[in-house]
Image (cartoon, helix red, strand yellow):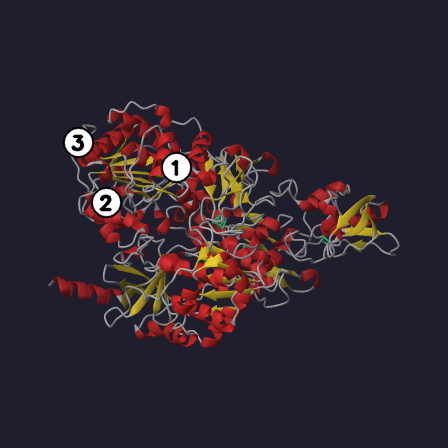
Amino acid sequence: MITLTIDGNSIQAAPGTTVMEAALAHGIDIPRLCYHPELSISGNCRLCMVEVEGWLNPTISCSLECQEGMVVRTQSAQLTAIRREILGLLLSDHPLNCLVCDKAGSCILQKYAYEVGLAGTPYPVEVARPLHQDDNPFFIRDHQFCIMCSRCVRVCDEVVGAHAIDIAGRGFHNHIATPFDGPMIDSSCVFCGSCVQVCPTAALLPASRKGLGREWELDRIKTICGYCGVGCEIEFAVKDGEILYARGTPEGPVNGEFLCTKGRYGWDFAESPDRLTQPLIRRDLAYALGLTDTPWALPETSVLEVEKPNIEDSFIPVDWDTALDVTATKLAETVQTYGPDAVMGLASARCTNEENYLFQKLMRLGIGTNNVDHCARL
Amino acid sequence: MTNSIREIRDADCIFITGSNTAESHPVLSYEVVRAAKRGAHVVILDPRRVPLVDHATLFLQAKPGTDIYIFLAMMHVIVREGWDDQAFIAERTEGYDAFVEVLRPYTPERAALMTGVPIEQIEAAARIYALGERADGASLYGDGRGHSTILYAMGITQRRNGTDLVMTLANLAMLCGQVGKPSTGVNPLRGQSNVQGACDVGCLVNVLPGYQNVTDAARRQAVAARWGVEDLPGAVGLTVVEAMDAAAEGKVRAAYIMGENPMLSDPNTTHVEAALRTLDFLVVQDIFLSDTAQLAHVVLPAASSLEKDGTITNTERRVQLIYPVIPPPGVARPDWEITGEIGARLDERLGRDRDPATWRFPSTAAIMEEIAAVTPIYGGILHPRLEGAGLQWPCPNADHPGTPILHTAAFSRGKGFFNLVEAQDPAELPDAEYPLILSTGRVLYHYHTGTMTRRSAPLNWREPGGYVEINPEDAAAAGLANGDEVVIESRRGAVQTWVKVSTDVPPGTVFIAFHWREAPANMLTQDHTLDPVAKIPEYKVCAVRLKKPHAAQEAAASAAD
Ligand code: SF4
Ligand code: SF4
Ligand code: FES
């Protein structure tokens, strides 16, 4: 272990640890824009400058390895002046749209500008990257807000492995680009939204949230993804009972901040108008039970040939008590007439443990059969 | 999984087989990408060039259904070259000598002939896996050999010899001592969010919660006692595929289906529909009117996973809490409430005088307390303990921290046993009439039978319709071009879809995903040869032929004349 001092605290760090990592691990917050704990070091924003005793000039801490006996200062008048300067330069190329910006409140550029008390830029304002690309229903790329931290490029390459985007152009005209600035769908993008997740500004925004709510108005609810068996934790941003967008958090025990396209963007099925909203009884059974006067028979054509089933054609809505009573009666009749093994139950790999437990208890204890399976095999 | 997902990034070698990880388990594939970027070897064995092959250091493209020859040949080479872990074998396993005898005839030469994979690739895969070699740099571990992990999925299990294949992978890991340590093990990737949990809590025909055999009278009666009865049925029940046959024969008369869509997910769709139609009573509980629900007498509206609480268990055995994010639509209710109501009312109808609290629980946390009481591996799993990161079972008591890695000191049965496995070919091989092999699977943007993802606007925008992947050679032979319509026929049925010419599939093989109800892949798959132990149908291999739509119509018309 190496011992060094950061802001007067004596800190132990394993060899190879950077000053940034050591500081963060001990609750010392160094300003940073391009650094991300899950990504390689880029060192392009320069905001993470620190002073090292005995060194002539401040240096960036995200790429500085801890050394025995090193004495580091993360705050000083000189460092604040440098950070103001850097932020002023960034803002000279960034529209100050905070009044209407969806990212306001969670924008990291805004946070640091606030911390150093910067209301604008001392430099002439000129937006270098005017490109606005709204070419897919997953996310919007608004390049004017991009600060070229390259987090998106790194996450796409290093974590997702898609390498759909990279830095194109030089100097003032550099920007994040798909091949030939083409639409996302023509690139190798897998629409996982990891780039959106790590973007510190509004350059990359979920399309679903545009203009629908400010950060501080949103409820945050964490849950586990309902799709595959990886079990990623997702944090939903909800306003008035409606989901505005989804994201990962560093605390996710399996996935950290990362999700796939289904987890991050595939939640709108729940709000589909096709959802079942009330119990239904098929018309022939309803007729037999005296719930309707019109006789009916299930058509013989395969259900797969029905392009879009119309619920009213085949079912009538009933209340819960009716539906549950009919179900219990029919199951009881089957057990009494043909024995418990004439009933089978299919549980669900998409329901909870509690639900599946109760389901197999119903089949084994209530009905009295081991005919209980699910599509694990399938 | 024997090991945990986050260990994958630190593996020296990752051996992936029968898993399209990047599309079926995307976030887990990020772990593989990270390992590869840091210099790990990634070895992939698959009939299809799956997207993760972009990050592989070695890709073995075997003909569908022949992978068993590669596994056996790899072990043949490992034994021949002395790459096996003799210390581990002596200390932790049994049956090695007989096992080595079985391997003898499975030479890499024979495997190369059967699979089309060059001998050198088989030998390289054997060495890299056995020794845990990295592509770049020294092992991250200092304990003798590098750490290798095996990841597999449905490409292994959905086979007539799926159980043999799983045992073979376990043999491979034991042979090389690649088990019981970080970043090693044999790791099945589960397809759906709670397949693991549904199995854990006993939704299987032969086991009670916690994999306690229904035929084990003592275990069964212990559960029965907790449920307030003397005993429970002791005969193994009917699996889905068996139950469908029994329904068709009139032996099964009623079915209760909760959140499943066997119309699209089960093999031989025509047969499934016929079976469901013969039932006297079918009740389906779901969030949409699925194709299965369309055949139901009663449909019960359920809350989706975003609208309820409870727990689900992921593929690394981690039990995690879910929370309601939005309210359910209309009067839809969580499945546990509905099932509980049916239980209580069923007791009344059957004239049983039982406390309705057997079925009606005040909360999911209360149900979990009962699960913990009857399920030894979940003994310490209670909701208050799950906040944060959840717990990985086995977790036998309330102080137990959970188990991230299985088999660290011993196997469940004590010593690991080398099961003797011989190669077996797929049940349905191509012939003159049906010259191509069909393989089924998933695409990234859709999930299972598509009931959810196809109703998601962005996902459906990206992947609006189904297609069949055909190698350029086969496409040319059939006179088909990209975007053409094509009819795929098997001995069981036909589906029509669009052609996607792709070198991802080798000549002689076509691939179709099973998410599309307008082109239901399982019209084609076969249900006549199940794995004898796991009773899993062989979805992954069946014989088909291609026709242009008008030719198919003419043939059908002349057959009708
Ligand atoms: S959505 Fe994912 S794949 Fe697409 S550019 Fe962003 S990080 Fe890369
Ligand atoms: S976010 Fe993607 S990878 Fe994670 S659990 Fe959901 S479907 Fe699986
Ligand atoms: S955070 Fe260190 S240079 Fe950007």
Q: Amino acid at mark 3?
A: Ala
Using residue A94 as the reference point, say whether residue B102 is left or right of it: left
Foreground: disc 1 or disc 2: 1
Q: Quadrant of the C terminus of chain B?
A: bottom left
Chain to which mark 3 belongs: A
Residue at 66% x, 58% y is A40
- Look at 85% across and 48% down and name the residue there: A78
* Label of residue A357 in the image: 1
The answer to whether mark 3 and mark 2 are in CB contact below 8 A is no
Q: Looking at the image, which residue sits at the far left?
A: B561
Distance between the Cα atoms at labels 3 and 1?
33 Å
In the figure, B536 relative to B357: above or below? below
In this orientation, which residue lies closer to the viewer: B165 or A146? B165
Write down the residue under mark 3.
A288
Residue B195 is labelled as none
Q: CA distance from mark 1 to mark 2?
A: 24 Å
